[in-house]
Amino acid sequence: MSTGLPVFDTTIQETNEWLAAIEARLRPCNRQQAYAALRAVLHVLRDRLPIDAVLGLSAQLPLLMRGLLLEGWRPSAGPTNIRDTDQFAAAVGALLPPSFPREPSAALEVVIAVLCERVNEGEARKLIQHIPTPLRTFWPAHMRAN
């Protein structure tokens, strides 16, 4: 499918690549469920980050995903105070459909791993610095080591 506008075609292609990577790692999830996982994790992560980190992350995402990240965001509310892994996973689970076939913690780990692979490494490292230490367990081990 082509929209006839390269900027839109590119963002659709890039977003589909992210979804395919999530779908492949989050079996038995399908593309729709991969989207649900991506959306849930991005929103919970966004709500835990300070404004400058959210904006830095958004600049690294494909245009379509930037809109997904910022959808419904209320920056004036400030970051959430979630510091516990169970609460973080529960917040993701609350945004997933009831029939989601995997645990919210699996969605967190997979989406964050794909995010760390696809955004600039420096940006990924900045993100983890804004996350409380207990929540960093959802990041790939090589990102936590430094």
Image (spheres, grey):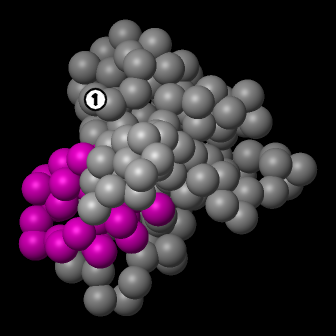
- Judged left or right of residue 26, residue 6 is right
Q: Where residue 125 sits in the image (x, y, percent)?
A: 46, 19
| Residue occupying the point 21% across, 79% down | 101
| Label 1: which secondary element | helix
Q: Where residue 34 sits in the image (x, y, percent)?
A: 28, 65
| Residue occupying the point 40% across, 84% down | 97
- Judged left or right of residue 126, residue 125 is left
- For the C terminus, the quadrant is top left
* Residue 33 in which image quadrant: bottom left
The magenta span reads 17-39
Vertical side of 142 occupied by 117: above or below: below
| Residue occupying the point 19% across, 49% down | 21
Residue closer to the observer: 8 or 58: 8
Q: Is residue 84 visible?
A: no
| Residue occupying the point 47% across, 62% down | 39
Is 41 one of the magenta-colored residues? no
* Residue 141 in which image quadrant: top left
Magenta stretch, main secondary structure, is helix
- Characterize the local packing of mark 1: few (<14), some (14-19) or many (20 or more) Cα atoms within 10 angstroms: few
Residue closer to the observer: 82 or 51: 51
Q: Where residue 45 sits in the image (x, y, percent)?
A: 55, 48
How many numbered marks, from 0 up?
1
Give the amino acid at mark 1. Glu
Vertical side of 72 occupied by 33: above or below: below
Q: Where residue 65 sits in the image (x, y, percent)?
A: 49, 50
- For the N terminus, the quadrant is bottom left
Is 34 one of the magenta-colored residues? yes
